Image (tube, grey):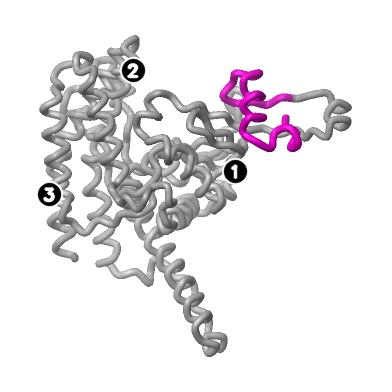
């Protein structure tokens, strides 16, 4: 509950937060009190940056992307941002899951523990969720990076990894076997070299564009992005692949009480044909949205430079049918190339988390090893798709 007169600066908000130590605040006051004191009832989210978040992103850009992206209505409105926390409006919706993007059509609505679980089969037409997300992602990718980044176009993927490795080095005794500082540095430098001369698009990226960082309204009419700690200049393909990567640890098969064999675990980690198909559909939607934006920008430029443009006929919205197979294959190769990078970055993150949370050492170790194994199994895809990309280029 807020009063604009009392909460119009950061100090007012910070005093308010000190009174209520909660991540999600929803305070209901007596209606007469609200009326007499000019208060309005309001929900908002308070996110306090952890040490992990502060290490991965320098103070001068912390919270900047949240503000800029919210201005484009791609994220909840930011109320206040400091180097220690960010407060934004509460978005009433559902956190998305991996299945929402692999199976865009799911079951009908049902209630579970009095919380509405939204599935999109009977709310959205086929691929509508993917189309909405692709359109908004293009909008994010096309904005200019804020001046606070000082025109530094180093992908956030690398700057974040470099900071994490530097921090791990300070507490290298926490590294579980088989990890060593040498092997981490060697793999990172090797991949940097592999990507250095490739025609990879660097955009204003989200940086952690997994399904859990997207929310959809309960009626399926809108989608917003959240958590921009790693936002900034980054690889376009990294954002897109992370949306479709299967990240969970392999689970036991339902008809078998025994542990999976190694072959079964490998199979569970590999993308299925259905997942590849959904990724291709998303790539098509992304390129269509990119063309629409390009056409709009061209029309704006033309109308501002020539009065003759007013007599020109408006172009129809491009559809996937207007895309050439070459365009789709090129972006698809660019995206698939980043699968190993999503595993490498995740493995280093869990090793990084271990340095700050030794109490849960086994949990972080297991996650880091699982991600590293997937990186090792998939890293040959970098050269394979780099070769495919250069053929198309």
Rounded to the nearest whole Å, what is the CA distance between mark 2 and mark 1? 31 Å
Q: Residue at x 45, y 75 (%)?
A: 298
The answer to whether the residue labelled 1 contacts the one labelled 3, judged by CB atoms less than 8 Å apart, is no
Magenta residues?
A: 1-27
Picture quarter with the C terminus: bottom left
- Left or right of residue 83: residue 168: left
- Left or right of residue 67: residue 28: right
**Where residue 148 appears, x then y in whole percent?**
42, 47
Q: Residues within 10 Å of mark 2 (few under 14, many from 20)?
A: some
- Which residue is disc 2 drawn over? 356
Q: Which mark is residue 77?
A: 1
Rounded to the nearest whole Å, what is the CA distance between mark 2 and mark 3? 34 Å
- Which residue is disc 3 drawn over? 383
- Name the residue nearer the viewer: 147 or 97: 147
- Where, by quadrant of the figure, is residue 144 drawn? bottom left
**Where residue 114 appears, x then y in whole percent?**
63, 25
- Give the mark nearer the N terminus: 2 vs 3: 2
Q: Residue furthest top?
A: 359
- Name the residue nearer the viewer: 218 or 386: 386
Rounded to the nearest whole Å, what is the CA distance between mark 1 and mark 3? 41 Å
Q: Which mark is residue 306?
A: none
**Where residue 162 appears, x then y in whole percent?**
24, 35
Q: Residues within 10 Å of mark 3 (few under 14, many from 20)?
A: some
- Where, by quadrant of the figure, is residue 329 drawn? bottom left
For the residue labelled by badge 2, is the local secondary structure a helix, a strand or a loop? Answer: helix
Could one spot residue 92 in this view of the protein? no
For the residue labelled by badge 3, is the local secondary structure a helix, a strand or a loop? Answer: helix
- Where, by quadrant of the figure, is residue 310 drawn? bottom right
**Where residue 157 appears, x then y in whole percent?**
29, 41
In front of the other: label 2 or label 3?
Answer: 2
């Amino acid at each position: 509950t807020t009063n604009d007169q009392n909460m119009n600066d950061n100090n007012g908000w910070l005093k308010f937060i000190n009174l209520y130590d909660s991540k999600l605040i929803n305070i209901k006051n007596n209606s007469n009190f609200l009326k007499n004191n000019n208060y309005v009832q309001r929900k908002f989210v308070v996110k306090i940056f952890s040490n992990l978040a502060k290490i991965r992103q320098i103070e001068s850009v912390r919270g900047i992307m949240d503000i800029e992206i919210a201005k484009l209505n791609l994220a909840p409105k930011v109320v206040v941002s400091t180097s220690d926390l960010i407060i934004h409006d509460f978005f009433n919706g559902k956190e998305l899951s991996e299945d929402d993007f692999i199976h865009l059509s799911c079951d009908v609505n049902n209630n579970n523990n009095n919380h509405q679980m939204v599935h999109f089969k009977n709310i959205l037409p086929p691929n509508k969720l993917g189309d909405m997300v692709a359109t908004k992602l293009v909008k994010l990718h096309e904005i200019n990076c804020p001046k606070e980044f000082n025109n530094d176009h180093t992908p956030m993927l690398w700057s974040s990894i470099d900071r994490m490795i530097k921090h791990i080095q300070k507490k290298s005794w926490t590294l579980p076997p088989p990890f060593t500082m040498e092997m981490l540095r060697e793999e990172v430098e090797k991949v940097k070299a592999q990507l250095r001369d490739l025609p990879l698009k660097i955009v204003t990226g989200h940086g952690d564009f997994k399904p859990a960082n997207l929310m959809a309204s309960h009626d399926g009419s809108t989608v917003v992005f959240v958590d921009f700690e790693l936002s900034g200049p980054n690889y376009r393909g990294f954002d897109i692949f992370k949306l479709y990567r299967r990240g969970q640890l392999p689970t036991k098969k339902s008809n078998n009480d025994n542990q999976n064999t190694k072959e079964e675990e490998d199979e569970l980690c590999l993308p299925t044909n259905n997942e590849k198909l959904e990724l291709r559909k998303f790539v098509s939607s992304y390129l269509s949205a990119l063309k629409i934006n390009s056409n709009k920008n061209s029309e704006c430029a033309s109308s501002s430079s020539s009065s003759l443009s007013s007599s020109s006929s408006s172009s129809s919205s491009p559809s996937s049918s207007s895309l050439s197979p070459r365009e789709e294959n090129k972006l698809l190769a660019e995206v698939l190339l980043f699968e190993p990078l999503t595993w490498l970055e995740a493995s280093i993150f869990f090793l990084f988390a271990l340095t700050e949370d030794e109490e849960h050492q086994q949990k972080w170790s297991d996650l880091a090893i699982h991600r590293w194994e997937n990186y090792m199994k998939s890293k040959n895809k970098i050269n394979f798709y780099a070769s495919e990309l250069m053929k198309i280029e």
